[in-house]
Amino acid sequence: MILKPQDILVLLKLIAIGRKAWSYSALALELGMSQSEVHSALKRTLQSGLAVKRDEAIIPNIRNLEEFLIHGIQYVFVPERGALSRGMPTIHAAPPLDSDIVSDQEPPPVWPDAEGEVRGMTFSPLYKSVPKAARADQTLYELLVLIDALRCGQARERDIASKKLRKRLEKYEKEAKPKS
């Protein structure tokens, strides 16, 4: 079993929606994937320990996911950088990092996207449908920006991103605990 980038995208979407009910078809539509891709992604996350089954629901295993995202994702899903392009800002050019990190005079990193309004240096998204999914869900967008900073950011960006990600994961975990 080998993890794929879409596995992380699906888990981040589950964190973004919190305790709300979801279906494979709804996730597929919102993430620009097929239902079978979502199903396979969740199956791989269960096998890897990044997700667990609680009753009949599949939920992210926050401790394992946090460890993987902060310490491992940069080695597994290495981004490609490219030429100037129109796209959607990421890393220090997008919330929640844009308020903490002053960018240099270089063009900002962007996910290539025909609907993007910012011209910058291309930065490959975690998965091809990320710009579409992020445009429709601000919480997911911010999680993906933090993940990009962990994938390729400088030490300071990585440190800020890991702190912000931990807070969001802790919030999700508190909300996702079963009521006693």
Image (cartoon, grey):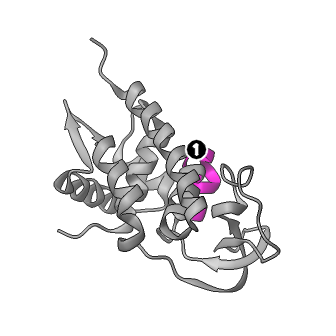
On the question of residue 133 being in view, the answer is: no
Mark 1 lies on a secondary structure that is: helix
Relative horizontal placement of residue 105, taking residue 17 as reference (left or right): right
Q: Amino acid at mark 1?
A: Thr
> Does the stretch in magenta take in 140?
yes
Write the residue at 58% across / 51% down: 160
Looking at the rendered image, the quarter that the C terminus falls into is top left
> As rendered, which of 81 and 74 lies closer to the eye?
74
Q: Give the x, y percent position of residue 95.
A: 68, 51
Tell me which corner region of the image, top left, top right, bottom left or bottom right, holds residue 103.
Answer: bottom right
Tell me which corner region of the image, top left, top right, bottom left or bottom right, holds residue 57.
Answer: top left
Q: Give the x, y percent position of residue 124.
A: 55, 76
Relative horizontal placement of residue 158, taking residue 100 as reference (left or right): left
Tell me which corner region of the image, top left, top right, bottom left or bottom right, holds residue 36.
Answer: bottom left
Q: Give the x, y percent position of residue 158.
A: 54, 59
Relative horizontal placement of residue 93, taking residue 91 as reference (left or right): right
Q: How many marks?
A: 1
Q: Which residue is mark 1?
A: 139
From which residue to which does the magenta span run?
Answer: 131-141
Looking at the rendered image, the quarter that the N terminus falls into is bottom left
Write the residue at 66% across / 49% down: 96
On the question of residue 18 being in view, the answer is: yes
Q: Residues within 10 Å of mark 1 (few under 14, many from 20)?
A: some
Relative horizontal placement of residue 131, taking residue 168 as reference (left or right): right
Give the overall secondary structure of the magenta segment: helix
Looking at this view, name the residue that lies furthest to the front: 155
Write the residue at 47% across / 31% down: 171
